[in-house]
Image (cartoon, grey):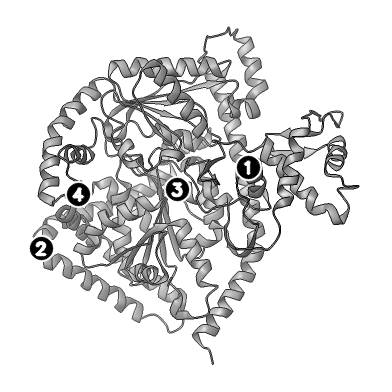
């Protein structure tokens, strides 16, 4: 009560912080007329002038005093900020035709101060990053801009690179298939784009090298992390590991795998502490364990006297992993099989994680289950958690559309505060209450009917699913109903940018897992650039080989179609988001909703749920079931109840809390190693720098 009163009186801490930035924005706007008068060469010359001012400030620092140097460097950058931002804004207008709005200038200032900016989808986060990236690159120490995938890293390096190059800075981009020399060149640039995995693995590889000349990275000065929640929170549950193959045999995994189909699943009575059957599964804790009967049965099948004998411990471990593979890991949900290989599917983005493997023999157990070639278990040579990698940076900042729900974790793990940036135009999306059915078939029927109805009306629909399996199930149903659609999941990710860019066209139906094209805007009426590529293909011209004139002519041809379609789609209510299941993290649901209603466009969203959904069944089941019985549910009918929605949100919060504990423990374990890692890596570096 007192908190609400004080917030009303003084404004929230977010509003108070934004108030301190307003004068900076006014100063940048005041500088715009005189910056406009500069010729291209004069504008470029400002970069040299700014660099000299920073260098002079640093030169005055006390010799060997790192803190004094840091203070003076940051003070010089703060002083230059209004002029530098004005220069970037003008360079952007001349190089790309895009002008930074005031809210984007606020976002840039927030990033420069080492915070996280929460900006809604479509507010131009990519353009915002150019402001602090340019300003901090003036130190000559290199700025790293980190994105979620190679495609976005290369797109942003090319697209935003036009602004940096216009101002006389160099731009690099790290891609998966680069050799060490190409990587070294990319890191030597003023601003380097790449993914978190590339940056993290390069750090580990550098610390395994024996010659400084072959190391690729330089300083860890300033990193701007795009989609910061995805990278610093979702991916932080998995450490980065560099491994080498061990020489152990793989036939034991096949032997262990043959045991599981012969075992019977039982139940656990926690009150009486009894277990039935050969094994019990706890989906909530994500565990599967053998009962005493199960151990005896496994011993008989394997022909061993005692699985707990030290000589059989390895076999026991293989059986336990085989049990997990069969009961907790599902094909087309947790992984896919492609070209005789088991590939993990990222549970948060729905993307394939090629090259990543589960540890402790779990990956081999899944390979045995799917009857594909078993790769040997790997031996860890170097490892670091993402949390400890990002703590290496002197200054860290991030951008996302959804960070508020994880604000406390950002602060406790990374010492990062979240600032919510106001939208450029008011948000007019309508978020409807969840509709809840008793069973999955009832829910899928309702989902299919809703899609068909909206498609016939001409309204574009984006259907969000949590797995490849579900996206294919909906696709089959729509095929039967004769509704044309596009599927975007880990299996069909090659056309991702194109599918997402055209998901706002009239009558478009797009089924997507959580990968739903982060970094690609869904424009109502379609994207003229992608439509232009289609026009060129019809003329049998390869869009990638077309001349600038051909491309421009095709874009001009596409624009009237897009504009007319945009008006029609707006009149129909804009993009409709249809969520088919709640994700464990509320943030992922908010991201899906955030695909609609960008930059003042209309839009709507609704989630269709059932009591048999994983989240409901495992975490909210009994309480929600009891509530629904009280509300008197019949087959085929759905309910919309604020009470039930609150119960679901409580379940999500409990899962988020559990996942936070997992990440916290991972960091605590790695912190012990981190001290050793820092000491050893520091000594290695010293020896390479001063071999005598």
In the image, residue 55 above or below residue 19: below
The x and y percentages for residue 502 are 28, 34
| Residue on which the image places disc 4 | 99
In the image, residue 75 above or below residue 94: below
Sequence-wise, which precedes: disc 4 or disc 2?
Answer: 2
* Left or right: 368 as drawn, with respect to 90: right
Front disc: 2 or 1: 1
Residue 650: quarter of image: top right
Query: What element does badge 2 sit on?
Result: loop
Mark 4 and mark 1: Cα distance apart in space: 55 Å
Front disc: 3 or 1: 1
Residue depicted at x 79% and y 28%: 267
Query: What element does badge 3 sit on?
Result: strand
Sequence-wise, which precedes: disc 3 or disc 1?
Answer: 1
The x and y percentages for residue 615 are 59, 29
Q: What is the residue that sits farthest to the right in this orientation?
A: 305
Sequence-wise, which precedes: disc 4 or disc 3?
Answer: 4
The x and y percentages for residue 688 are 52, 83
Residue depicted at x 49% and y 84%: 689
- Inspect this view and state whether residue 480 appears: yes
Q: Can you tell which mark lies on residue 371?
A: 1
Mark 3 and mark 1: Cα distance apart in space: 47 Å
Whether pointer 4 and pointer 3 mark residues with C-beta atoms closer than 8 Å, the reply is no
- Inspect this view and state whether residue 78 appears: no
| Residue on which the image places disc 2 | 38
Q: Can you tell which mark lies on residue 418?
A: 3
Choose between 112 and 594: the one closer to the eye.
594
Mark 2 and mark 1: Cα distance apart in space: 67 Å
């Amino acid at each position: 009560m007192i908190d609400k009163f004080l917030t009303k009186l003084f404004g929230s801490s977010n509003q108070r912080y934004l108030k301190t930035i307003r004068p900076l924005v006014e100063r940048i706007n005041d500088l715009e007329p005189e910056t406009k008068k500069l010729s291209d060469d004069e504008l470029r010359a400002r970069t040299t002038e700014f660099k000299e001012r920073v260098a002079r400030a640093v030169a005055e620092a006390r010799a060997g005093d790192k803190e004094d140097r840091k203070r003076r460097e940051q003070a010089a950058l703060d002083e230059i900020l209004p002029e530098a931002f004005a220069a970037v804004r003008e360079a952007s207008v001349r190089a790309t035709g895009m002008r930074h709005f005031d809210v984007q200038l606020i976002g840039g200032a927030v990033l420069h101060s080492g915070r996280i900016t929460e900006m809604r989808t479509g507010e131009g986060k990519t353009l915002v990053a150019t402001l602090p990236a340019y300003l901090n690159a003036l130190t000559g120490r290199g700025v790293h801009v980190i994105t979620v995938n190679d495609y976005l890293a290369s797109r942003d390096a090319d697209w935003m690179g036009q602004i940096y190059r216009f101002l006389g800075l160099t731009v690099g981009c790290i891609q998966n298939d680069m050799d060490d020399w190409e990587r070294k060149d990319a890191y030597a640039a003023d601003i380097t784009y790449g993914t978190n995995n590339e940056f993290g693995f390069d750090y580990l590889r550098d610390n395994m090298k024996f010659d400084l000349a072959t190391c690729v990275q330089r300083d860890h000065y300033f990193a701007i992390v795009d989609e910061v929640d995805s990278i610093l929170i979702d991916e932080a549950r998995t450490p980065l590991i560099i491994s080498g193959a061990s020489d152990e045999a793989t036939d034991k995994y096949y032997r262990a795998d043959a045991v599981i189909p012969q075992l019977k699943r039982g139940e656990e009575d926690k009150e009486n502490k009894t277990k039935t059957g050969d094994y019990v599964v706890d989906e909530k804790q994500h565990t599967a364990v053998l009962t005493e009967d199960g151990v005896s049965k496994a011993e008989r099948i394997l022909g061993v006297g005692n699985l707990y004998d030290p000589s059989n411990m390895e076999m026991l471990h293989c059986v336990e992993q085989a049990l997990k593979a069969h009961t907790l890991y599902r094909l087309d949900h947790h992984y896919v099989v492609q070209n005789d290989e088991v590939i993990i599917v990222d549970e948060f983005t729905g993307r394939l994680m090629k090259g990543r493997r589960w540890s402790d023999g779990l990956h081999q157990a899944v390979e045995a289950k799917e009857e594909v070639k078993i790769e040997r278990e790997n031996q860890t040579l170097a490892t670091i958690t993402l949390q400890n990698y990002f703590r290496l940076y002197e200054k860290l900042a991030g951008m996302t559309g959804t960070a508020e729900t994880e604000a406390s974790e950002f602060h406790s793990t990374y010492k990062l505060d979240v600032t919510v940036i106001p939208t450029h135009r008011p948000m007019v999306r309508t978020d409807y209450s969840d509709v809840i059915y008793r069973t999955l078939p009832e829910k899928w029927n309702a989902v299919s009917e809703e899609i068909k109805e909206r498609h016939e009306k001409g309204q574009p629909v984006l259907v969000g699913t949590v797995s490849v399996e579900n996206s294919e199930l909906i696709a089959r149903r729509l095929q039967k109903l004769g509704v044309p659609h596009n599927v975007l999941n880990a299996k069909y990710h090659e056309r991702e940018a194109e599918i997402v860019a055209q998901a706002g066209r009239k009558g478009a139906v797009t089924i997507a897992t959580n990968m739903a094209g982060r970094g690609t805007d869904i424009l109502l009426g379609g994207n003229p650039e992608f439509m232009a590529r289609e026009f060129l293909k019809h003329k049998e011209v390869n869009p990638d080989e077309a001349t600038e004139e051909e491309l421009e002519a095709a874009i001009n041809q596409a624009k009237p179609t897009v504009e007319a379609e945009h008006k029609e789609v707006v009149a129909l209510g804009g993009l409709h988001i249809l969520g088919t299941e709640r994700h464990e993290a509320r943030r992922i649901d908010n991201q899906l909703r955030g695909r609609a209603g960008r930059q003042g466009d209309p839009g709507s969203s609704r989630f269709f749920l059932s009591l048999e959904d994983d989240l409901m069944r495992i975490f909210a089941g009994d309480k929600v079931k009891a509530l629904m019985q009280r509300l008197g549910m019949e087959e085929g009918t759905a309910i919309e109840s604020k009470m039930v929605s609150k119960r679901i949100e409580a379940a999500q919060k409990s899962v988020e809390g559990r996942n936070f504990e997992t990440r916290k423990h991972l960091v605590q374990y790695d912190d012990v190693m981190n001290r050793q890692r820092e000491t050893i890596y520091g000594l290695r570096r010293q020896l390479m720098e001063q071999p005598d």
